[in-house]
Image: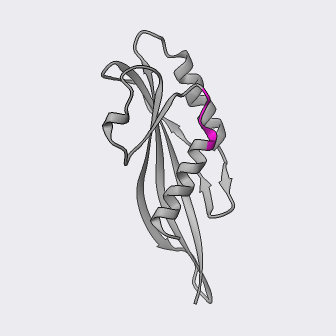
Amino acid sequence: MTVEALHSALRAEVAANLPDNIGTVVYDNQDLASVPGSGRYARVRILGHDHEQVTCGATARFRARGRVVIEVFEPLGQGDRTLLENIDTLRTAFLGHRVASPQIAFDPPSVTDGTRAGAFYMRSLVIPFRADELVTT
């Protein structure tokens, strides 16, 4: 599996599970001009790509490990209830989630402490993943 195919599959899973009330979604490869000046939004980053061979033999299993980070931003002064509800929705969606093709398993997500980010309050959901590829020799 190529890195591009893995990233595309991960982005598709995030897009399919984002709450409807998150307006703009910014991916780590986009221009910062796409970040809204106001309104709720999310930033999605894909980190790491440690690779290992898991099995040997005629069909070998290779595994990529990394993390999907979804940062949810809420304008200051609106409280954090909606922000936390969105984090809970995402956490529930990825808890034990698996994708059949390509083979991706998501490990239990963690939630970071909240922080101020300019005119926004932000929390991150960090979702570890394992992506397997079978290679026949």
Q: Is residue 70 left or right of residue 88?
A: left
Q: How many marks?
A: 0
Residue name at image x 37 percent, y 44 percent: 30
> Which residue extends farthest right?
100
Residue name at image x 42 percent, y 61 percent: 49
Position of 17 relative to 2 (above/below)? above
Q: Nearer the viewer, residue 121 or 119?
A: 119
Q: Which residues are magenta?
A: 16-20
Q: Is residue 43 left or right of residue 90?
A: left
Q: Estimate the x, y position of residue 36 in percent, counting from the top left.
A: 39, 27
Position of 69 relative to 3 (above/below)? above
Residue name at image x 54 percent, y 28 percent: 22
Q: Estimate the x, y position of residue 137 in percent, counting from the top left.
A: 58, 90
Colour treatment of the image:
one colour
Residue name at image x 65 percent, y 36 percent: 92
Q: Is residue 83 left or right of residue 105?
A: left
Q: Looking at the image, can residue 108 be seen?
A: no
Q: Nearer the viewer, residue 36 or 54?
A: 36
Position of 51 relative to 14 (above/below)? below
Secondary structure mainly formed by the magenta segment: loop
> Which residue extends farthest top?
77
Q: Is residue 103 magenta?
A: no
Q: Looking at the image, can residue 12 be seen?
A: yes
